[in-house]
């Protein structure tokens, strides 16, 4: 390993753009957010060291023995998170990045690329929720947010439209990538003049001048990219170096390390491509999930029956990695089937509060050969019901919080010995009386009524009440008595006594006023008084009785004026069902 002559940021970014710099398969993907990129550029402007880099030289004659990836150029949080595979069939030797990938990617995105992340409160499936942003620098003032005192320069990712609309006396947003178009100091000065920045008050003009010239200097002139070059071609040695040097910066997660070692160890498959591709696949099931490689890799450790399933270096040996590769098809089939099963219960990214709860289900299906028709065949109906009880109970009892391995290990042992049918009773007995028990006492059942509209656990709680519901159709979480009726003025108009209004306002969003209703039916119901809607939608006494029984609606006066009795009586009906299904 030898120290090389430093290069400029522009040279480094040009090499990334020309695909002269590539990433070995052991490298993780981009993990930096926009603030980390902004801080990196702030450090450059302040002449702070940005750390040394480690490059790996690979002779073109050996390049085909390894898998390489290109740098990501236009990051998109939903649609473009993975690095594309590189074509190494050319005539040039390869320079791969062992340390500094996050920083080089950040420099490239800041100068030549884009970063699209989801805007708050917009739906994940809405393309407009991910506007394309570029890095901008304010040429009029220093960074002024007191909460971020470690920043001096005002860098910010903005859309081009935002950059134009947000120009005012304190902001002139300069697109950072435009600095690459300037070749001389003369061009920098010309831009300042033509932009009218030199006609501003002297203090502002001086700051704009110094800031833009400083940016030009740190990108074009200063040799701030210090790097070492490793020329060894033994992958085990390179992997060792990679693990050690990546202990700083944004630390390698255990799953990053496992994926890196799998990438170096698998013989017939591209581990990185297989695992990240599979994560993308299962995240698209039904209404969408939020699985990550940690979930898939942890599932691999459990399903392969390794004695130790902890994410620690000792478990990341080549023998284990090859065992995972050998069983990869069976593992993915079990996980794929599990995700489809859980989706059939109505779960999605918003309601599945613990992905670890799926691992025992995947292990059970894995042990039984993952029958392809498990999700819908009548012969598995009872089995599906038992799995659902396990899932709901473990989620509501938060069994996997804290130290999930202490649950996964004993559950795996129980399933391994009893997998002719899903062993719900045996699992319950294994944990009975222990901190991770999945049985409910009376107080815990009453605590379920504390879940409210918007809580992640509310869906699981209601799912207990609808064990036979067919979730092929999309169900909405519905306020039985519409929320719009619970404004103080509306309640007073209805003659609700002032002393009772507090109860109404306190209970409107809680479990006793919530139900699961099919989407079209919920849309039709909207803000109608519940008693009126019920009689219009279900005009015969029998149809109304069927609806009320299905949704635990008490046989009382259903007008809003009787809300207190409605809540009290519905809690009794719901409690009886909870007692029946959750006592286990």
Image (cartoon, helix red, strand yellow):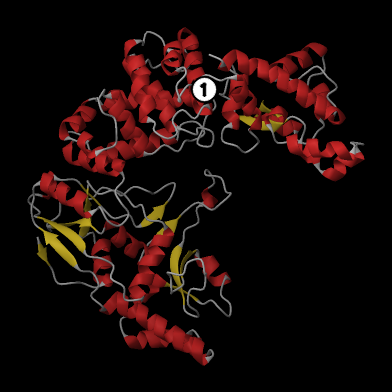
Q: Is residue 378 above or below residue 263?
A: above
Q: Is residue 13 above or below residue 288?
A: below
Tell me what residue is drawn at x 8 percent, y 47 percent: 234
Q: Nearer the viewer, residue 451 or 117?
A: 451
Question: Residue 357, position in %: x, y?
Answer: 43, 27
Question: Residue 6, position in %: x, y?
Answer: 18, 72
Q: Is residue 267 visible?
A: no
Q: Nearer the viewer, residue 465 or 430?
A: 430
| Left or right relative to 396: residue 508 | right
- Residue 99 quadrant: bottom left
Q: Is residue 82 above or below residue 531?
A: below
- Residue 513 quadrant: top right
Q: Nearer the viewer, residue 542 or 559?
A: 559
Question: Residue 337, position in %: x, y?
Answer: 40, 23
For mark 1, does the 10 Å Cα neighbourhood hold few (<14), some (14 to 19), or many (20 or more) residues?
many
Q: Is residue 325 above or below residue 570?
A: below
Question: Residue 88, position in %: x, y?
Answer: 17, 51
Tell me what residue is drawn at x 60 percent, y 37 percent: 455
Q: Which residue is mark 1?
A: 393
| Left or right relative to 8: residue 236 | left
Q: Secondary structure at mark 1?
A: helix
Quadrant of the snapshot with the N terminus:
bottom left
Q: Is residue 232 visible?
A: yes
Count of numbered labels shown in the rendering: 1
């Amino acid at each position: 390993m030898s120290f090389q002559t430093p290069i400029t940021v522009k040279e480094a970014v040009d090499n990334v753009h020309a695909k002269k710099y590539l990433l070995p398969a052991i490298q993780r993907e981009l993990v930096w957010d926009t603030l980390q990129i902004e801080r990196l550029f702030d450090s450059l402007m302040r002449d702070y060291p940005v750390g040394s880099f480690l490059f790996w030289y690979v002779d073109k004659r050996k390049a085909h023995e390894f898998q390489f990836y290109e740098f990501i150029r236009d990051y998109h949080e939903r649609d473009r998170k993975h690095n594309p595979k590189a074509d190494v069939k050319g005539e040039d030797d390869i320079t791969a990045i062992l340390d500094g990938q996050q920083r080089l990617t950040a420099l490239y995105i800041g100068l030549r690329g884009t970063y699209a992340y989801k805007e708050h409160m917009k739906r994940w499936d809405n393309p407009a929720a991910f506007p394309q942003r570029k890095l901008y620098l304010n040429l009029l003032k220093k960074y002024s947010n007191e909460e971020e005192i470690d920043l001096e320069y005002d860098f910010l990712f903005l859309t081009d439209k935002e950059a134009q609309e947000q120009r005012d006396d304190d902001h002139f947003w300069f697109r950072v990538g435009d600095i690459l178009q300037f070749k001389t100091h003369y061009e920098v000065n010309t831009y300042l003049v033509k932009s009218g920045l030199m006609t501003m008050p002297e203090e502002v003009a001086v700051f704009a001048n110094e800031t833009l010239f400083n940016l030009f200097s740190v990108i074009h002139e200063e040799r701030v990219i210090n790097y070492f070059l490793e020329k060894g071609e033994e992958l085990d040695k390179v992997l060792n170096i990679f693990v050690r040097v990546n202990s700083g910066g944004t630390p390698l997660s255990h799953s990053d390390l496992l994926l890196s070692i799998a990438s170096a160890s698998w013989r017939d498959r591209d581990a990185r491509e297989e695992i990240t591709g599979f994560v993308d696949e299962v995240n698209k099931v039904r209404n969408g999930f939020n699985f990550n490689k940690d979930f898939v890799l942890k599932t691999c450790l459990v399903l392969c029956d390794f004695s130790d399933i902890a994410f620690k270096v000792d478990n990341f040996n080549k023998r284990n990695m090859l065992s995972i590769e050998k069983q990869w098809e069976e593992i993915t089939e079990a996980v794929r089937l599990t995700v489809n099963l859980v989706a059939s219960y109505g779960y999605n990214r918003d309601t599945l509060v613990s992905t670890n709860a799926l691992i025992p289900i995947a292990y059970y299906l894995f042990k039984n050969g993952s029958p392809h028709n498990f999700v819908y065949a009548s012969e598995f109906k009872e089995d599906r019901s038992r799995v659902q009880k396990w899932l709901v109970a473990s989620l509501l009892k938060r069994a996997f919080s804290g130290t999930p391995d202490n649950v996964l290990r004993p559950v795996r042992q129980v399933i391994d010995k009893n997998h002719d049918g899903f062993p719900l009773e045996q699992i319950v007995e294994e944990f009975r009386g222990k901190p991770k028990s999945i049985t409910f006492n009376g107080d815990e059942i009453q605590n379920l009524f504390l879940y409210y509209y918007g809580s992640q656990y509310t869906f699981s709680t209601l799912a207990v009440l609808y064990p036979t519901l067919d979730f092929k159709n999309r169900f909405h979480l519905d306020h039985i008595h519409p929320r719009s009726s619970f404004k103080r003025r509306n309640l007073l108009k209805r003659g609700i006594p002032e002393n009772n209004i507090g109860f109404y306002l306190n209970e409107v969003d809680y479990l006793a006023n919530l139900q699961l209703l099919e989407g079209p039916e919920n849309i039709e119901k909207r803000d109608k008084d519940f008693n009126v809607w019920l009689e219009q939608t279900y005009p015969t006494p029998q149809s109304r009785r069927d609806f009320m029984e299905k949704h635990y609606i008490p046989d009382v006066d259903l007008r809003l004026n009787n809300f207190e009795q409605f809540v009290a009586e519905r809690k009794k009906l719901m409690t009886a069902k909870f007692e029946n299904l959750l006592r286990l």
